[in-house]
């Protein structure tokens, strides 16, 4: 099960009060602006970047111990956010377009 990570405007205050600070969580918060920009570059300016960041973090959460063994999670986080963003674009494109009839 994925840990709940709060994606809010005041994320620094939330992070500073977090008890468990592993490499994945620490890297995520340090790179939040870069990760947001990466997702936005794929999804566009009106996309819900927070959902993509949450999904990427959850995908990596179960592997956090092995990530800690690597010593650096930045490349993995950026790559995962980019891939999750691409997946989101593909899912949206594969949905049939529905229109309302008056």
Image (cartoon, grey):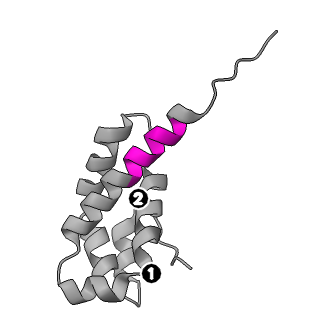
Q: Is residue 91 magenta?
A: yes
Q: Which mark is residue 38?
A: none
- Mark 1 burial class by Cα count in 10 Å: few <14, some 14-19, many 20+: few
Main secondary-structure element of the magenta-colored stretch: helix
Residue 66 position by quadrant: bottom left
Q: Secondary structure at mark 2?
A: helix
Which residue appears at 63% of the width and 24% of the height? 97
Vertical side of 93 occupied by 20: above or below: below
Q: Which residue is the site of mark 1?
A: 62
Q: Secondary structure at mark 1?
A: loop
Between 34 and 78, the one nearer to me in the picture: 78
| Furthest-top residue in this view | 102
Asked if residue 17 shows in the view, the reply is yes
Task: Locate the N terminus by quadrant.
Answer: bottom right
Relative image position of residue 54 (x, y in whole percent):
46, 62
Residue with the mark numbered 2: 53
Q: How many marks?
A: 2
The residue at 28%/40% (across/down) is 41
Range of residues picked out in magenta:
84-92
Outermost residue on the right side: it is: 102
81 in the magenta segment: no
The residues bearing labels 1 and 2 have C-alpha atoms spaced at a distance of: 15 Å
């Amino acid at each position: 099960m994925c840990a709940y990570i709060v994606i809010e405007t005041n994320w620094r205050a939330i992070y500073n009060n977090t008890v468990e600070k592993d490499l994945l969580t620490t890297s995520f918060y340090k790179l939040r602006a870069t990760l947001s920009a990466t997702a936005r570059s794929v999804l566009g300016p009106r996309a819900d970047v927070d959902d993509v960041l949450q999904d990427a973090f959850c995908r990596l959460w179960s592997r956090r111990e092995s990530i800690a063994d690597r010593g650096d999670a930045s490349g993995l986080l950026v790559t995962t956010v980019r891939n999750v963003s691409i997946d989101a674009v593909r899912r949206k494109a594969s949905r049939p377009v529905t229109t309302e009839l008056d």
